[in-house]
Amino acid sequence: MQVKKLVEASKSMQVSVTSYLGAQLMLAIHAGMPFMQKRKPITISMPVNLRNYYPSETLRNFFNSVDVSHQFDGNETLESLAEEFDKKLKEAITPENIKNQMNRFQSMERLGFTRVVPLAIKQPVIKAFAKKDAKTVTAVLSNLGKVTVPTEMGKYIEGFTDFCSTDKIFITVTSYGDNVVLGIASAYAGTSVIRRLIKSLKGTGTAVKLYATEVIR
């Protein structure tokens, strides 16, 4: 899609691009939920680059995740949901809240009991808790931001995209030049959520070019 159109749509609601896309994704998911489940909260998880909060020169992944949840009551509009999403996201990524989250993790590691537990026991327990926590997440949205390359390479590159393996829906957002690309990976055979999301984004007035690859197991 065109970066300009997406930014204009976000600015018209006075929210970030991430919040705008997050609200669109929530609505696309909720529209296809069975009637008895429509009151269940939808949670979008978003990776946060911890290099923005802590000095680090590591080349390894250095991130944490924050969640934004909403329980639908049937009165939502895209504008109201985007505003709520933006407010919750900004609260979650304040330096204070990120620091508190990291401190909680660190304090658990420093407990005398956990330090003496053998890894053979500790690792399965951690995996079990991580799996349980992952069940509360409906989808993942990762805004990787703007990609820049040396001027000499620019004429050879049309755009960038990224994909992550997932057991749900995982969307990455990458912009380059005048284009922004959503890398959508889904573990589901049905494509209704993706189709509703793309259709809604086309409502912003921007042309959407869609490439799809179906993997059948």
Image (tube, rainbow, N blue to C red):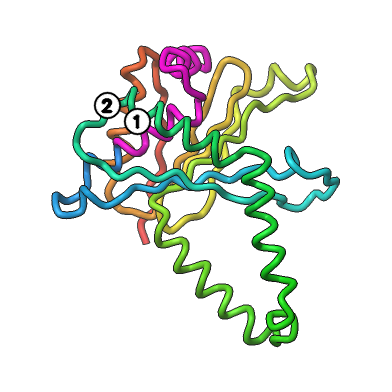
Question: Is residue 166 in the magenta section?
Answer: no
Closer to the camera in the image, 190 or 39: 39
Labels 2 & 1 near each other (Cβ < 8 A): yes
Relative horizontal placement of residue 108, taking residue 179 as reference (left or right): right
Is disc 1 placed on a helix, strand or loop? helix
Q: Position of residue 13 (x, y in %)?
A: 41, 17
What type is the residue that disc 2 sits on? Thr
Q: Which residue is mark 2?
A: 77
Query: What crowding class fits label 1: few (fewer than 14 Cα within 10 Å), some (14-19), or many (20 or more)?
Result: many
Q: Report which quarter residue 195 is drawn in.
A: top left
Name the residue located 63 percent from the left edge and 54 percent from the top edge.
101
Name the residue located 49 percent from the left edge and 47 percent from the top edge.
67
Name the residue located 50 percent from the left edge and 16 percent from the top edge.
7
Residue placed furthest toward the left? 35
Q: Report which quarter residue 105 is drawn in.
A: bottom right
Closer to the camera in the image, 46 or 193: 46
Any part of residue 186 in sight? no
Relative horizontal placement of residue 205, taking residue 65 as reference (left or right): left
- The correct choice, above or below, for 66 with respect to 166 in the image is above
Name the residue located 29 percent from the left edge and 37 percent from the top edge.
28
- The correct choice, above or below, for 41 with respect to 211 in the image is below
Q: Which residue is mark 1?
A: 81
Relative horizontal placement of residue 52, taking residue 94 as reference (left or right): right
In the rendered structure, which segment of residues is drawn in magenta? Answer: 1-27
What type is the residue that disc 1 sits on? Leu
The number of numbered discs placed on residues in the rendered structure image is 2
Is disc 2 placed on a helix, strand or loop? loop
Q: Position of residue 112 (x, y in %)?
A: 74, 81
